Image (cartoon, rainbow, N blue to C red):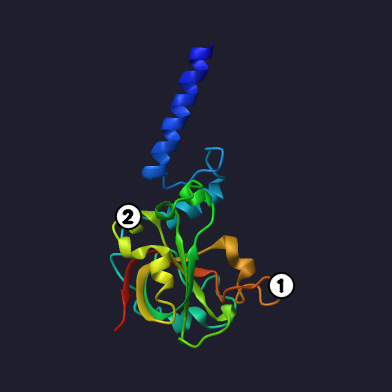
Amino acid sequence: MKRVISFSISILIFITLFEQTTFHCPVTGLKEDGSLPSPDIVALDKLKNRKNSPSTINETITLSKILTSGNDRNRFQNNQGAKITGYIFFAKKGGSEDCNCHYGKEEFIDTHIEIALSSGETSKKKVMVVEMTPRFKATHSEWRTNKILALKGKKVTITGWMFFDEKHWQNSKNTNPNGTNLYRATAWEIHPVTAFEVEQ
């Protein structure tokens, strides 16, 4: 019995060390206990974890249009590619999420970036969120959160997939104008970000 327990502990240590150095989370995401999330969450995670860049860009999608007030749930589609230009309002590491299998290391979690229409914006209720995901961060060392935050106030152009984050409709002014915990204008995101340029 002791050998079995010792072997199990060794395997657990190996898996833990492997997870600390390798990102191998499935596109479905996983709950903290290692099981699959509910089907509706799996559907969202698959969109968040897209590995390819959009083959076409919808040129009619602009940051101004994304931030326009009013119920915007059906304003765009999750299969649309978009390219927007705006200013970095803030950036932070994503939290413990099913989509990234609750990994905690910087390179295995999303970087959340808040984008505003002007460098002088002061209200979170007037920003959109875009997210850099591990599958794209793996080939872009300059996409680490601290490096993005250092660009606060800078003008940037961001390309990627439109995504309506159902988890945050209640935190968005457009879909929940009378809410008490509003920290974004819209639940629409560019997620994942597939290209990121700093304008000179």
The residue to which callout 1 is attached is 180
Q: Nearer the viewer, mark 2 or mark 1?
A: 2
Please indicate, yes or no, whether residue 53 appears anywhere in the rendered image. no
Up the image or down, 27 lies above or below 161; here it is above
Q: Secondary structure at mark 2?
A: loop
- Going from N to C along the chain, the mark reached first, 2 or 1, is 2
Residue in front for this viewpoint, 15 or 116: 15
Up the image or down, 179 lies above or below 26; here it is below
For mark 1, does the 10 Å Cα neighbourhood hold few (<14), some (14 to 19), or many (20 or more) residues? few
For mark 2, does the 10 Å Cα neighbourhood hold few (<14), some (14 to 19), or many (20 or more) residues? some
Q: CA distance from mark 2 to mark 1?
A: 37 Å
Q: Residue at x 46, y 19 (%)?
A: 7
Looking at the rendered structure, the kind of residue marked 2 is Ala
The residue to which callout 2 is attached is 138
- Image coordinates of residue 152 in percent, x first then y, are 44, 78
Please indicate, yes or no, whether residue 147 appears anywhere in the rendered image. yes
- Image coordinates of residue 76 in percent, x first then y, are 46, 72
> Which image quarter is the C terminus in?
bottom left
- Image coordinates of residue 22 in percent, x first then y, are 36, 43
- Image coordinates of residue 111 in percent, x first then y, are 44, 62
Q: Secondary structure at mark 1?
A: loop
Up the image or down, 26 lies above or below 89; here it is above
> Which image quarter is the N terminus in?
top right
Can you tell which quarter of the image residue 33 is in? top right
Can you tell which quarter of the image residue 79 is in? bottom left
Q: Residue at x 57, y 45 (%)?
A: 38
Numbered tag placed on residue 38 in the rendering: none
Looking at the rendered structure, the kind of residue marked 1 is Thr
